[in-house]
Amino acid sequence: MIKIKLILLLASSLTVMAGAIITPGLPDIGRYFHSYPDVWVKLIITLPALFIALFSPFMGWLADRFGRLPVLLTSLCIYALGGAAGALAESMSFMLLTRALLGIGVAGIMGIATTLIGDYFTGQERQSFMGFQGSFMALGGVVFINLGGLLALWSWRANFLVYLFSLVVFILAWWFLKEPQRKQKSSESVELAGFPLASVLPIYALGFVAMALFYLLPAQMPFLLVERFQVKSLETGWVIATSTLAGALAGFLFGRIKNRISHAQIYAVAFLLFALGYLLASQVNSYAWMLIAVLISGFGAGMTFPAGNHWLLTLAPEEYRGRVMGGFASVFFMGQFLSPLLAAPVEAWSGLTGVFLGAALLAFILSIFLLFSPPGRFQEQRRSS
């Protein structure tokens, strides 16, 4: 089981690496493609999210229909090809094409890795491992961000070669993972159960907003730091790494937190931390205070990932598990893709400071809504038929 857990953790960390490894070099990439507006440069890290959103439900359907491992292994190969090809980009069109291919790979990896956690583990072990998954992904983010910052000092192209690490995960998964044994159910019982849309839709909505808020950090923060403090790529990496380190701590504590409060309450606390962190980020005038701001918001972000995944695994019937998790990956990364596009008009009107201030207000409103919602508004676990 230790080998299985390690492989699932490594696969999950690849989804974080998809954006984290090139974030510190984003200003350098922007200078290379200087003839394009900033919004095009930001698409380099957010375009994969669009293709994750488009392909995740399909990958979930394939996993439910043909098995988890064929989809996972194929996705790992696509990830390596699309990610590493960015190192060869001489035009923006080719760069965006490789990022789209990377997104298709992530679509299979993220949803299937989490689905396999639901297949392999149950009860408290699943709950604890979900938190550990979030923690490991966040720690992976720290490693990848700092590695990206160091590589960007040499050349931004070097960052893209790190995506080849997915081939190592491919070999490990092919050698050690086994297709889960699933209970056979009649087509009639599956049809009666149906896709639990009414139960999962509110969680999808929360996941969308959480990711849109979180992705202000890698998409907007590098530019805010340059604007306010004239920092280098390595210092940008430290800010992002501080946020992800806080997220790692939140993931590590998820199992204990979940034993005390509901999933909805976890989201309420997370949005409150988003609000406080982004309020500080919009106002502070020192680099040290910015580190504190992203530490707070990062802890909130780190709570949302395991909370959403664990919540859905408790609600999803086994025969729909791949599609439910694929749907969550879809809305999750649609939030990532739309984050800079939603922020663009706010930035045009009030600058990057206004973007983080507006995000803080939105997060605070959502936190209050969740804290004072009636106890039965959100379904916490699957009802027995």
Image (cartoon, rainbow, N blue to C red):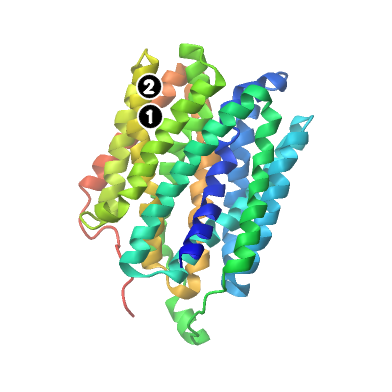
Q: Is residue 27 visible?
A: yes
Identify the residue at image location x=71%, y=21%. 32
Identify the residue at image location x=35%, y=34%. 297
- Numbered tag placed on residue 294 in the rendering: 1
Residue 260, horizontal then vertical, whole percent: 20, 55
Residue 170, horizontal then vertical, whole percent: 64, 58
In the image, taking residue 200 as reference, residue 147 lies left or right, namely: right
In the image, taking residue 310 as reference, residue 64 lies left or right, namely: right
Residue 219 vertical position relative to residue 19 in the rendered view, above or below? above
Split into 4 quadrants, where in the image is the C terminus? bottom left
Residue 168, horizontal then vertical, whole percent: 64, 54
In front here: 136 or 207?
136
Residues under labels 2 and 1: Cα distance?
Answer: 6 Å
Residue 239, horizontal then vertical, whole percent: 44, 26
The three-letter code of the residue at mark 2 reads Met
Secondary structure at badge 2 equals: helix
Residue 272 vertical position relative to residue 183 in the rendered view, above or below? above
- Numbered tag placed on residue 86 in the rendering: none
In front here: 316 or 253?
253
The three-letter code of the residue at mark 1 reads Val
The 10 Å Cα crowd at callout 2, few under 14, some 14 to 19, many 20 or more, is many
Circles 2 and 1, Cβ within 8 Å, touching? The answer is yes
Tally of numbered tags: 2
The residue under label 2 is: 290
In front here: 104 or 354?
104
> Which of the 4 quarters of the picture holds residue 11?
bottom right
Secondary structure at badge 1 equals: helix
Residue 134 vertical position relative to residue 359 in the rendered view, above or below? below
